[in-house]
């Protein structure tokens, strides 16, 4: 599995930014990664997020690398 780093923003009076690291597969669409990032942030914040307009951006995405222990025909 690879990983993606997602920047989440909640537009409140404080204009709060969060950065979350999410495991992902190479064929995951951006919407799935962003949804998982919001879910992880909500878990990290103990189930409570402030009200406000929400936006998200994928900052980086690392590819999936095989380890030397994996067989070449095994799925990632």
Image (cartoon, helix red, strand yellow):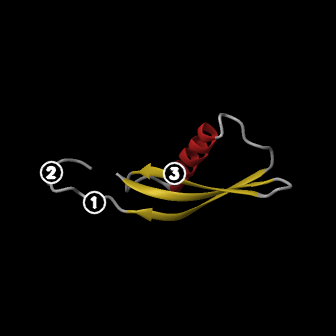
Mark 2 element type: loop
Q: Secondary structure at mark 3?
A: helix
68 over 45 or under it: above or below:
below
Residue 69: mark: 2
Residues at marks 1 and 2, CA–CA distance in whole angstroms: 11 Å
Of the two numbered discs 2 and 3 on the same chain, state the one appearing first in sequence.
3
Viewed as shown, does residue 2 lie left or right of 7? left
Q: Residue at x 82, y 56 (%)?
A: 14
Residue 2 screen position, x and y as percent: 37, 55
Quarter-wise, where is residue 18 in the image? bottom right
In the image, taking residue 50 as reference, residue 63 lies left or right, namely left
Residue visible at 51% across and 51% down?
A: 33
User: Which percent across, then down, holds residue 3?
Assistant: 42, 55
Kindly indicate whether the residue at mark 3 contacts the one at mark 2 (C-beta within 8 angstroms).
no
* Direction bottom: furthest residue: 60
**In the foreground, 75 or 67:** 67
- Residue bearing the label numbered 1: 65
> Around disc 2, counting alpha carbons within 10 Å, would you say few (fewer than 14), some (14 to 19), or many (20 or more)?
few
Q: Residue at x 60, y 37 (%)?
A: 43
Q: Position of residue 72 (x, y in %)?
A: 14, 54
Viewer-nearest of discs 3 and 1: 1
Mark on residue 33? 3
In the picture, measured across the screen, residue 51 lies left or right of residue 35, that is right
Using the numbered discs, state the Cα–Cα distance from disc 2 to disc 3 in whole angstroms: 27 Å
Whether 22 is drawn above or below 57: the answer is: above
């Amino acid at each position: 599995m690879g990983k993606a780093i997602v920047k989440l923003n909640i537009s409140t009076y404080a204009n709060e930014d969060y950065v979350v690291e999410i495991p992902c597969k190479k064929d995951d669409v951006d919407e799935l990664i962003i949804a998982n990032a919001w879910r992880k942030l909500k878990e990290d914040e103990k189930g409570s997020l402030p009200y406000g307009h929400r936006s998200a951006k994928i900052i980086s995405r690392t590819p999936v690398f095989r380890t030397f222990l994996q067989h070449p025909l095994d799925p990632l």
